Image: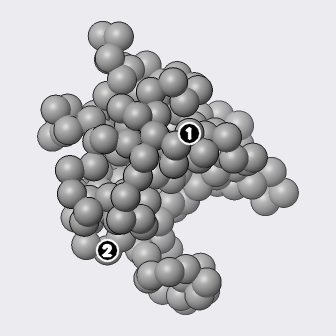
Amino acid sequence: MELVRFDGAYAGTVAGWAASVEETRWWCSRDEVTAETVAGWVAQPDTEAYGLVEAGELVGFGELWVDEDDAEAELARLIVAPGHRGRGVGRALVAALTEEALRRKRAVCLRVNPANAPALRCYAAVGFRAVPQELADEWNRDQPEAYVWLCHEPAA
């Protein structure tokens, strides 16, 4: 699998990957996502969108939200094509995005809906660990819901 920059050409494809309103909320805290929504995300400053490609097919999408001032990146809006779930594609996507951020010497964190058990397992498998509760409370202060916040801890 190869991580490539996402230019928005497949925004409609990605927009259709969430199978339910609940899954859409887990993915991006919205009830509905359109091609225009995804294309708008890709165009945002400080957002680097990526696709994960396998055998010429787009199988995953995710973003790095880059904070140059703090040398940080947040993994965001990660989703795997429905027919490719349960095969390690999510793990490969998270690992590739994390590697991209670390290559540029950035700390890497992410937030996840606490009910999204498959995502929590995936992130743990790639080395993400929950931040201390006090920090999570601070980061959740201005959020629409209380997320689980995780940061990458490289293997010793």
Q: Nearer the viewer, residue 144 or 150?
A: 144
Seen at 60% across and 45% down, the residue is: 40
State the image coordinates of residue 140 (x, y, percent, origin top left).
54, 82
Seen at 80% across and 51% down, the residue is: 68
Quadrant position of residue 83: top left
Find numbered disc 1 in the image and state the secondary structure of the residue it sits on: helix
Q: Nearer the viewer, residue 124 or 88?
A: 88
For residue 61, side relative to residue 70 (left or right): left
Instruction: Identify the coloring.
Output: one colour
Residue 22 appears anywhere in the view:
yes
Amino acid type, callout 2 = Pro
CA–CA distance in space, label 1 to label 2? 27 Å
Tell me which numbered mark, 1 or 2, is placed earlier along the sequence: 1
Quadrant position of residue 69: bottom right
Q: Is residue 102 above or below residue 52?
A: below
Q: Which mark is residue 151?
A: none
Amino acid type, callout 1 = Ala
Q: Is residue 115 above or below residue 78?
A: below
Seen at 59% across and 47% down, the residue is: 41
Q: Residues within 10 Å of mark 1 (few under 14, many from 20)?
A: many
Q: Which residue is mark 2?
A: 114
Seen at 35% across and 10% down, the residue is: 56
Q: Is residue 93 above or below residue 106?
A: above
Q: Is residue 143 above or below residue 41?
A: below
| Quarter of the figure that contains the N terminus | top left
Residues marked 1 and 2 touching at CB (< 8 Å): no
Q: Which residue is mark 1?
A: 39
For residue 112, side relative to residue 4 (left or right): left
Residue sticking out furthest to the top:
55
Q: Residues within 10 Å of mark 2 (few under 14, many from 20)?
A: some
State the image coordinates of residue 139 (x, y, percent, origin top left).
59, 79
Find numbered disc 2 in the image and state the secondary structure of the residue it sits on: loop
